[in-house]
Amino acid sequence: ASAARAGPGLPRDFPLAPSVSACAPLVINHEVLCDWQGVDTRAVYDFYQAALPKAGYTLVGNNTFHSAPHASGQLSFKKGDVTGAILVLDNDLKIEVITPP
């Protein structure tokens, strides 16, 4: 059911990790940015690695997670003309979604 919850500004079908609330996005032209602090970095990364393909998003590029020296990871995705990235660093989560004009 968490895959049905999307924050304002994010695509309607965009999955939202159970540990985060809907964001108050920063919208610049066709780019939506959402930030959260205090997340479980590995759990959020693993959630999006599984949830994005289930929601029809294709993972693209070199998606990696590193435990040291800091917990960090990146997932790049695409669905139709929509592209974006999930970035996690220490306990922060950033989602960037770019939609076509």
Image (cartoon, rainbow, N blue to C red):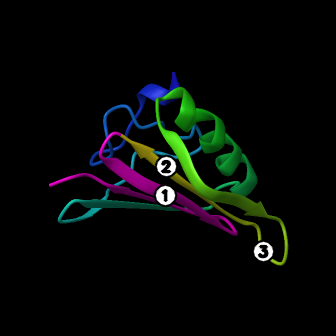
Tell me which numbered mark, 3 or 1, is placed earlier along the sequence. Answer: 3
Tell me which numbered mark, 3 or 2, is placed earlier along the sequence. Answer: 3
Q: Which amino acid does label 3 sit on?
A: His
Q: Where is residue 46 in the image (x, y as percent from the top left)?
A: 70, 44
Q: Which class describes the residues within 10 Å of circle 3: few (<14), some (14-19), or many (20+)?
A: few
Queried whether the magenta region covers residue 87, the answer comes back as yes
Query: What residue sits right under mark 3 in the picture?
Result: 70
* Residue drawn 38% across the image and 37% down it: 6
Query: What residue sits right under mark 2 in the picture?
Result: 77
Q: Where is residue 35 in the image (x, y as percent from the top left)?
A: 46, 63
Q: Which class describes the residues within 10 Å of circle 2: few (<14), some (14-19), or many (20+)?
A: many
Look at the numbered disc 1 and give the secondary structure of its residue: strand
Q: Distance between the residues labelled 3 and 1?
A: 19 Å
Seen in the image, is 67 located left or right of residue 88? right
- Quarter of the image that includes the C terminus: bottom left
Q: How far apart are marks 3 and 2 (CA)?
A: 23 Å
Q: Which amino acid does label 1 sit on?
A: Ala
Count of marks overlaid on the render: 3
Q: Where is residue 70 in the image (x, y as percent from the top left)?
A: 78, 74
Question: Magenta residues?
Answer: 80-101
Query: What residue sits right under mark 1 in the picture?
Result: 85
Query: Mark 1 and 2 residues: CB-CB less than 8 Å, in contact?
Result: yes
Q: How far apart are marks 1 and 2 (CA)?
A: 6 Å
Queried whether the magenta region covers residue 59, the answer comes back as no
Prevailing secondary structure of the magenta residues: strand
* Image position of 23 with respect to 11: above or below: below
> Looking at the image, which is closer to me, 100 or 96?
100
* Residue drawn 74% across the image and 53% down it: 42
Q: Which class describes the residues within 10 Å of circle 1: few (<14), some (14-19), or many (20+)?
A: some
Q: Where is residue 24 in the image (x, y as percent from the top left)?
A: 32, 56
